[in-house]
Image: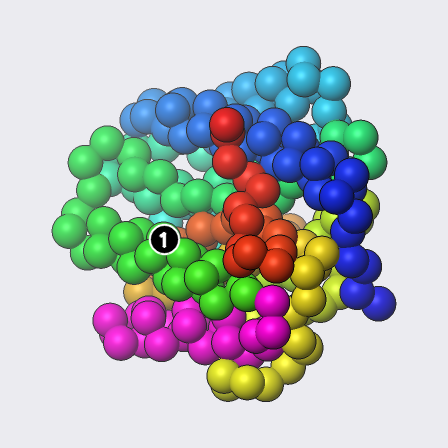
Amino acid sequence: MIVLKTSRELAAMRAAGRISSRALRLAGEAVEPGVSTWEIDRMVRRYIEEQGAVPTFLGYGGFPASSCISVNNVVIHGIPSKKIILKQGDIVSIDIGATYEGFVGDNAWTFPCGDVSGEAQALMDATREALFEGIAAARAGNRIGDIGSAVQRYVEARGYSVVRSFVGHGVGAKMHEDPAVPNYGTPGRGVRLLPGMTIAIEPMINQGVKDVRVLPDEWTTVTTDGKLSAHFEHTVAVTPDGPVILTLPD
């Protein structure tokens, strides 16, 4: 069931999104050679809790951390660890959720660790721009397929592939609500977008093939060919005046 949000609920989601986006920015600033993903996660949890919010991911389905930190060929759901030490040239996808006043803000970004290769930078740039292509399509009267098609067209035209095993989603009082928001699709197909809908648009784009596999820890998801992957995400509200990004720091 799709839940349309009231103006009061949208304000609460904006507050949650602000906390989540600030935590993400803080995490990104900590991405440096020699830093462990565990240290970054600890920083994220401390910041979210200091704001009077709750790290949405911590304990969600048994997930053991406050953020997903995925390095290089890890697509999503990387578990922070003291053993994972960032090095020059890594690309680091960080996904963070914060729950505040009963609502969730969910966002992700891929950060360079120092200087990265031109190929890595191009993948990150394309994935980020694909996110904004998808957001631009999240207009009342359009359909879910318009969002996915916009993302898919943008990245496939640049030689990248769209992960299909995992998709975006509705978000609100729960982290995962209806509808599913794939990063691929056919224009004019799928659920119609209505004012008050709030969705997480999150392209997960691979340098090589689209196929992924989940490691034995049942969380960490990697590309099957070992090539790089990037992940960008915003929580977005559909309004009569167009899409509004709820996960912005200010």
Residue at 33% over, 71% down: 154
Q: In what element is the residue under mark 1? A: helix
Instruction: Read off the residue under disc 1.
Output: 128
Quarter-wise, where is residue 68 in the image? Answer: top right
Residue at 75% over, 43% down: 7
Q: Which residues are magenta?
A: 140-167
Report if residue 237 lies within the magenta region: no
- When the figure is inspected, residue 152 is found, relative to residue 29, above or below; the finding is below
Residue 1 visible in image:
yes
Q: Residue furthest left?
A: 118
Residue 183 x/y as whole percent: 50, 70
Residue at 55% over, 49% down: 244
Amino acid type assigned to the residue bearing label 1 in the image: Arg
Of residue 53 and residue 194, the one placed in the foreground of this image is: 194
- When the figure is inspected, residue 91 is found, relative to residue 200, above or below; the finding is above
Residue 3 x/y as whole percent: 81, 59
Residue 103 x/y as whole percent: 76, 39
Is 218 situated left or right of 74 in this image?
right
Is 219 situated left or right of 86 in this image?
right
- When the figure is inspected, residue 154 is found, relative to residue 105, above or below; the finding is below
